[in-house]
Image (cartoon, rainbow, N blue to C red):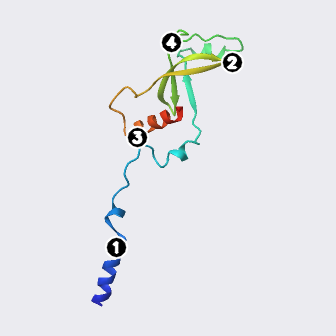
Amino acid sequence: MSESNESLEQTENTEQSPEAMSPEPASSVSHAAPLLLGVKLPIRILLGRTQLCLRDVAQLGNGSVVELDCSPNDPVEVIVNDKIIAHGEVVVVGGNYGVRITRIEGAATNAEPEGQSELLNLSEGLKA
């Protein structure tokens, strides 16, 4: 019986080598990154804000103008999943409106939440 216990312990020891138990070295790009690249996310661009009475909202129709609290040259916010991720400026491209990204939120600070620098590195890699 003791011989079978020794062989069982040896088998367990060889299966759990130190290399198998240590975590994989951290890489600059997550293994999940390729899977996430195909995920579609809703993106909103915040041009400005305003407050209207319910009476005024009910009177809105075709051709109504809603005045915002900003000027045409003010920066806009790029929002993904209700979080501001970047700031930019409105541009016209081929008759359509677009946003030129001028600053990525959190890129200028050293106190980035864990994983955010990885996403920024990934976005930088996609630019190339």
Residue position for label 1: 14
Query: Relative to 35, is 76 above or below?
Result: above
Viewer-side residue, 52 vs 19: 19
Residue position for label 3: 115
Q: Is residue 36 left or right of residue 113?
A: right
Residue position for label 2: 94
Q: In this view, does 94 lie to the left or right of 127?
A: right
Task: Single out the mark in the foreground, 2 or 4.
Answer: 2
Residue 81, percent across and down?
A: 51, 34
Residue 34, percent across and down?
A: 53, 46
Viewer-side residue, 128 vs 76: 128
Three-letter amino acid code at the position of disc 3: Gly
Three-letter amino acid code at the position of disc 4: Asp
- Element under label 3? loop
Q: Are marks 2 and 4 in contact (CB under 8 Å)?
A: no
Q: Are marks 4 and 3 in contact (CB under 8 Å)?
A: no
Task: Single out the mark in the foreground, 3 or 1.
Answer: 1
Q: How far apart are marks 1 and 4 (CA)?
A: 64 Å
Viewer-side residue, 125 vs 95: 125
Three-letter amino acid code at the position of disc 2: Gly
Q: Which of marks 2 and 4 is nearer the N terminus?
A: 4
Task: Single out the mark in the foreground, 3 or 2.
Answer: 2
Three-letter amino acid code at the position of disc 1: Thr
Please name the residue shown 69% across and 16% down the image. 95
Residue position for label 4: 74
Categorize mark 4 by other alpha carbons within 10 Å: few (<14), some (14-19), many (20+).
few
Given the current orientation, which residue lies at the most extreme front position? 128
- Element under label 1? helix
